[in-house]
Amino acid sequence: MSEANLSSSFDSHFVDAGGVKAHYWTLGTKTNNDPPLLLLHGVASSVLEFQQNMNFLANEAKQQVYALDLLGHGWTDKPQDPVMYTIERQAQFILDFMTALDISAAQLLGWSHGGRLALQCAAMEPERVKSMILVAPAGTGPNVLLELRLATLPGIGACVANFPSALSFRILWRKVFYHDTSSSIVTNEFIQKKLEIARQPGTQYGMVCCLRSLLNYRGFLRGPLEQIESKLVDMKMPVLVVWGKDDLFLPYKQHKVLKDKIPSVQVELFEKCGHAPHMEKVDLFHDKVAAFLKSI
């Protein structure tokens, strides 16, 4: 896909991040000594999931904003070696991206898998993470949508990797959003954009590898769950957790471990909202995020 087709609103940029060609958007200018805000999307997603948020965060919340395509996603490189997709290596890619742009520290806003990666970055290099906004973060409890668990199985994973279809994407993405709003968001144009990205060589393989880094057919793996939970108490930076109470992917009650363990945490639970509060409850999400950023 040509770079011009990414979005009519934001220009594409690329940088070498630890030997990986990383794609990103950026908007806004640095003010005072505030660290920039780095947006991290979920599995099977891309920077496109932040189209509705970039302008507000840059212009209204007065942030210098970066949206990064994660390793194996969007228009970032897609290594074909599963070793590259360990949770530690995925987080290191984000830290390498920051280093490549001379960002010594950042505020991380992570959605779903991006939220889990934000936590991993904070565990690995806490001095580089000044605050976190965790939007329905993955990997904080054992439960996850059946379809994602099944995608980790060898045969099913191969089908997912090799045969992305409009029907399967429509079924899955409608489950992302609260049922009253899903049909208005998951349009034919929306699905077409997802397919264009998914049909790039290596994209679905990267998605399956990312899933397998944290879960299997039973749910999230005990090892990574215990590893990140043991680090939460040491995360001293301010943290905002946002979760939809009708999330079918990751039950919102899994926020409790974050509330109980992280010393400085604020939790916002949205009614009649699914797995993507930043896309479903845009104005409310922006209000909560702006207030949090102003308070720290």
Image (cartoon, rainbow, N blue to C red):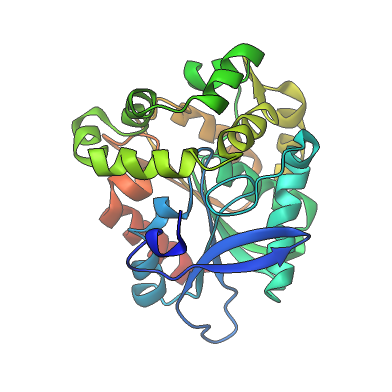
Query: In the displayed image of the protein, which residue is found farthest to the bottom?
Result: 32
Q: Residue at x 45, y 78 (%)?
A: 28
One can see residue 143 in this view: no
Q: Is residue 172 above or below residue 110?
A: above
Location of residue 45 in the rendering, given as x and y in whole percent from the top left corner? 48, 43
- In this orientation, which residue lies closer to the viewer: 240 or 213? 213
Q: In the visual, does 25 lie left or right of 264?
A: left
How many numbered dots are placed on residues in this image?
0
- In this orientation, which residue lies closer to the viewer: 255 or 148? 148
Q: Is residue 260 above or below residue 16?
A: above
Q: In the visual, does 222 lie left or right of 284?
A: right
Q: In the visual, does 214 lie left or right of 25?
A: right
Quadrant location of residue 237? bottom right
Location of residue 11 in the rendering, given as x and y in whole percent from the top left corner? 44, 71
Quadrant location of residue 80? top right
Location of residue 109 in the rendering, given as x and y in whole percent from the top left corner? 52, 56
Q: Residue at x 70, y 31 (%)?
A: 213
Q: Residue at x 74, y 69 (%)?
A: 99
- In this orientation, which residue lies closer to the viewer: 33 or 190? 190
One can see residue 204 in this view: yes
Location of residue 102 in the rendering, given as x and y in whole percent from the top left corner? 71, 76
Q: Is residue 288 above or below residue 9?
A: above
Q: Residue at x 72, y 71 (%)?
A: 100
Quadrant location of residue 69? bottom right
- In this orientation, which residue lies closer to the viewer: 12 or 256? 12
